[in-house]
Amino acid sequence: MQTPIMIRGFAVFKGFLDAAAQAALVEDLRTVARAAPMRAPVTRGGKRMSVRMTSAGRVGWVSDRRGYRYELLQPGGEAWPAIPDRILRLWRDVTGLARPPDCCLVNYYGEGARMGLHQDRDEGDFSWPVVSVSLGDDGLFRMGGPARGGKTESLWLNSGDVVVMQGDARLAFHGVDRIRFGASRLLPDGGRINVTLRVVSPD
Ligand SMILES: O=C(O)CCC(=O)C(=O)O
Ligand SMILES: [Mn+2]
């Protein structure tokens, strides 16, 4: 296993996936998006997010006027598609855990999309790691600490990079300030995909 760069407790595996592995993952995610179409969710305040999202797994992450949460069903009432095997394998390779993630959140950043600083804290047990995979265009990832307004550090994530948030970084603030739209040719129409894998239930 490659040794990650550690930034404020975030473990960053640069170039974890080669070009062939990245292309294979994109195909898997197309299958997911056919079964569970991408949506641009609104926040509790009614603001539409610039990132489009869908999920695979036992539960999917949703946001609407009722707030953020995990749901067993898609907004249309269907179950979420299964997490593709290749993604489950990546989780096992990176974490060494036999326990699979419950949710594979798929974020798509088109031109101008961003994600504000936030903590991942809708899960039942923060002792499990969060694994995030970048595909397509570069994204400027901002990493902070456990409190909003603290010092932050930024790093460009490129296609094939994997970040693990665990330990001190598990509840650290993070976000994506901007992407370099069109920087990568992995996605024919440009944009950035981020896949986030999380254990949601404490059992
Ligand atoms: O796009 C990224 O790199 C981060 C995504 C993220 O933080 C999230 O979905 O909670
Ligand atoms: Mn997050």
Image (spheres, helix red, strand yellow):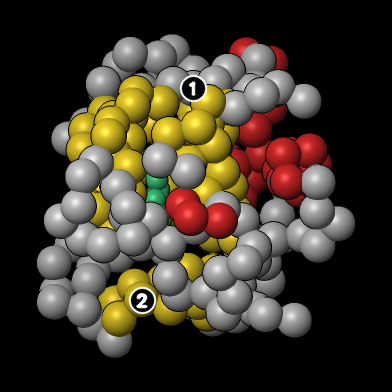
What's the mark number on residue 68? 2
What residue is drawn where x is 33% and y is 13%?
A: 183
Q: Position of residue 49 (x, y in %)?
A: 22, 57
Q: Amino acid at mark 2?
A: Tyr
Q: Is residue 184 above or below residue 87?
A: above
The residue furthest bottom is: 66
Q: Position of residue 14 (x, y in %)?
A: 54, 21
Q: In the image, is the residue at mark 2 within 8 Å of ligand 1 by its beta carbon?
A: no
- Whole-angstrom CA distance, mark 1 to mark 2, is 27 Å
The residue pinned by badge 1 equals 159
Residue 65, visible in the rendered structure:
yes
The crowd level at tag 2 (other Cα within 10 Å; few <14, some 14-19, many 20+) is some
Query: Which badge, 1 or 2, is on the more N-terminal residue?
Result: 2
Camera-side residue of 8 and 175: 8
Q: Amino acid at mark 1?
A: Ser
What's the mark number on residue 198? none
Camera-side residue of 9 and 16: 9
Camera-side residue of 165 and 183: 165
Q: Can you tell which quarter of the image residue 75 is in?
A: bottom left
Label 2: state its secondary structure.
strand
Q: Can you tell which quarter of the image residue 155 is in?
A: top left
What residue is drawn where x is 56% and y is 56%?
A: 167
Q: Can you tell which quarter of the image residue 101 is in?
A: bottom right
Left or right position of 95 against 45? right
Q: Is residue 18 above or below residue 175?
A: above
Name the quadrant of the N terminus: top right
